[in-house]
Image (spheres, grey):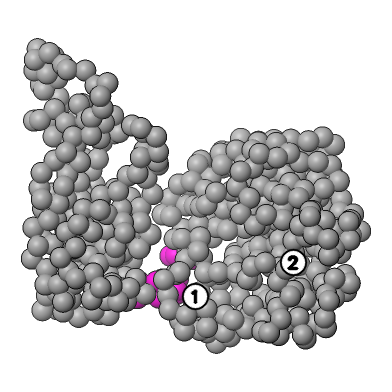
Amino acid sequence: MAEQTDGTTQARTESHDPDFPEAFLQFMRGGWRDDSRTVTPLPEAPNYAKRRNALSEAFPGETLVIPTGVEKVRANDTDFHFRPGSDFFYLTGDHGPNGVLVLRPSGSGHDAVLFSRQRSSRENDEFFRSRDGELWVGRRPTLAEKSTELGIETAPYGELGRALAECAPARTRVLRGLDPNVDRAVLAYEPAANAPRDRELAHVISELKLVKDEWEIAQLQQAVDATVRGFEDVARVLPADRSVKERLLEGVFGLRARFEGNDVGYSSIVGAGPHATILHWIRNDGVTRPGELLLMDMGVEGRNLYTADVTRTVPVSGTFTPLQRQVYDIVLASQQAGMDFIRPGVKFHDVQLVCMRVLTEGLHDLGLLPVSVDEAMSEQSSVYRRWTLHGFGHMLGIDVHDCNSARKQAYRDGPLGEGYVLTVEPGLYFQPEDDLVPEELRGVGVRIEDDVVVTADGCRNLSAGLPRTADDVESWLADQRAAGPRLPE
């Protein structure tokens, strides 16, 4: 049964559910032993408390409402796999659906309460009759267990409505669009007047997430290390002399992601041949071909939701052609220039200019630019972007595109700080139908992407476990193929 904010419940049953006889209902209600558990605080719980305190300091005297979101129907009576809302998880560490964090002002700052679904009741048959019941979906923690593990006060989700009704509209901020029950409860808050206040809440949470602490960086490193192993798994089943389906490679990496982490951090991009020129190619319904390139953009999301985001472009046959290598080396030089430039105080936008300058010079060397490098780089032209398409990178963390609600002056137009984690991922893409490039370039796409953490004097490549130079990629691919397929251990 799904609990509503007014304290009522709504059964999630289906038209095909049987009408059970009373004898069966009585039989199901008894004979169950107590399954209470002893739990201990999670070692990372203080991290979440520290983040809540930082958010509290940004909004003294105001009530803050941060939902995680609800399960979403995939088809009829099946749901998508639930993934917690990133901001909610950043502040609580709670994986379950239908949770809402409420920070209520107190004399010393804020009191945090996590409103959460209770266990399936054995008194109203919910535990076996509702498709949310625990005989269907598994045991949920009790509120007391969750409170102990996460180090936060908990309350039943059904009491949320009364708590929201007590909020003063002019002193309440809500993270909207995640939980329809919360959105309905705050409709009376004059949306036009409160929208800027709510956006400010989203801005501040994103900006708090910009700097990663040591625990977060360790989580990202674990996700990256698992991703490296996933790329190795794929290379070991990629034949040099025949075609295989992109979805085979996607599935092999997905096995590693589910085995070592929570899931993939985003839909894996496995682009063979001309599919490499499609930035968000996730259909993955093509095949590899010897002689062509294979672009793979994949990342493991760890169990605490921090995700890697890595791209490698490899020659299916095992060896780059001279032209493929030339394009690859231009992209690698761009990436290296960006990584060499990164350090605290450098503006994010300036890293973009450094990377794009190298790509533009490479396009000039290929004879493609209709104007000079300087003119192509000018804001009045930017014609180089026909073949670069996207920026040099983005912030990385609990979201693959982390901190996206941060204000431009704190992110896109702001300086990098020590502890920022970001991708560096320049690319060149020559569309199959592009008449402005030579025929031999059409359908060639190359991206190289690594995850770096900004250090006191530069940056550290978290994904250095994968090769980057053309020679090293060829050697690595040969080594993986020689080792043969493996199952995760």
Who's the residue at 43% across and 50% down the image? 303
Q: Position of residue 403 (x, y in %)?
A: 44, 69
Residue at the limit of the structure toward the right, as seen here: 322
Tell me the kind of residue under disc 1: Gly
Please determine whether, in this image, residue 178 is positioned above or below residue 46: above
The CA span between labels 1 and 2 is 32 Å
Check residue 266 for magenta coloring.
Answer: no
Instruction: Please say whether residue 212 is one of the residues in the magenta stretch.
Output: yes
At a point 35% along the width and 40% down the height, the residue shown is: 73
Q: Is residue 29 above or below residue 213?
A: above
Circle 2 SS class: helix
Question: In front: mark 1 or mark 2?
Answer: 2
Which residue bears the numbered disc 2?
387
Q: In the image, which residues are magenta?
A: 204-217
Specify the quadrant of the image occupied by residue 433: bottom right
Label 1 or label 2, whichever comes before in sequence order = 2
Query: Which residue position is annotated with label 1?
Result: 419
Q: Residues within 10 Å of mark 2 (few under 14, many from 20)?
A: many
